[in-house]
Image (cartoon, rainbow, N blue to C red):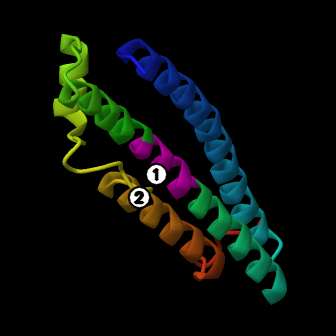
Amino acid sequence: MNEFEIYQIAQFNFINNAIYTVAVILMTGISFYLIRRAREINFPFYGKIILSSFCLCTVFFGLQVSSYLVLNQKNMSFQLSEIKANGGEISAVGESFISLWGQTVADGPASLAPDIPSTVLWATIFLMFVFGIWGKAPKGAYEK
């Protein structure tokens, strides 16, 4: 595989990741809407459990999409460094990708794990979901 093919495959992966990111954003918006409606109509206990499981799936899906983005970036760096290690020439852009994402032949292929900012973001959204569903609303918040 040459450098151009690596870039082409990575771009397809970035497009797929962008589509899934849109789906995650829509699911997050739907989750917040359902939480607001659950508070307005005073959802029963079993409804809150079902809503919690939906929100948990949204958080998991968001973490997974973030993980695939990081995996694509690091594996692109790994593949470029593999070409370089085998004596092939890579462009200055390839060198910058290797230095930016830092995954080299010595590190091996990347694992499926989200980066720290994504983990913090989704942990925060998870807490917002949990407190939105199970937390006590301020007095008069949903009275008309």
| Residue 110 in sight from this viewpoint | yes
Dot 1: what SS? Answer: helix
The residue most toward the front is: 86
**Residue stretch in magenta:** 62-71
Q: What residue does disc 2 label?
A: 113
Q: Residue furthest bottom?
A: 45
Camera-side residue: 84 or 123? 84
Marking on residue 67: 1
**The C terminus - image quarter:** bottom right
Which of the 4 quarters of the picture holds residue 98? top left
* Three-letter code, disc 2: Ala
- Magenta residues: mostly which secondary structure? helix
| Left or right, residue 62 beside residue 29 | left
Is label 2 in a helix, a strand or a loop? Answer: loop
- Residue 25 position in % (x across, y down): 61, 43
Q: Is residue 69 magenta?
A: yes
Q: Position of residue 93 (x, y in %)?
A: 24, 15
Residue that appears at 43% across and 64% down: 124
Q: Decide: few, some or many residues near mark 1? Use Cα within 10 Å; few <14, some 14-19, many ≥20.
A: many
Amino acid type at mark 1: Ser
What residue is drawn where x is 22% and y is 11%?
Answer: 91
Task: State if disc 2 and disc 1 touch (CB < 8 Å).
Answer: yes
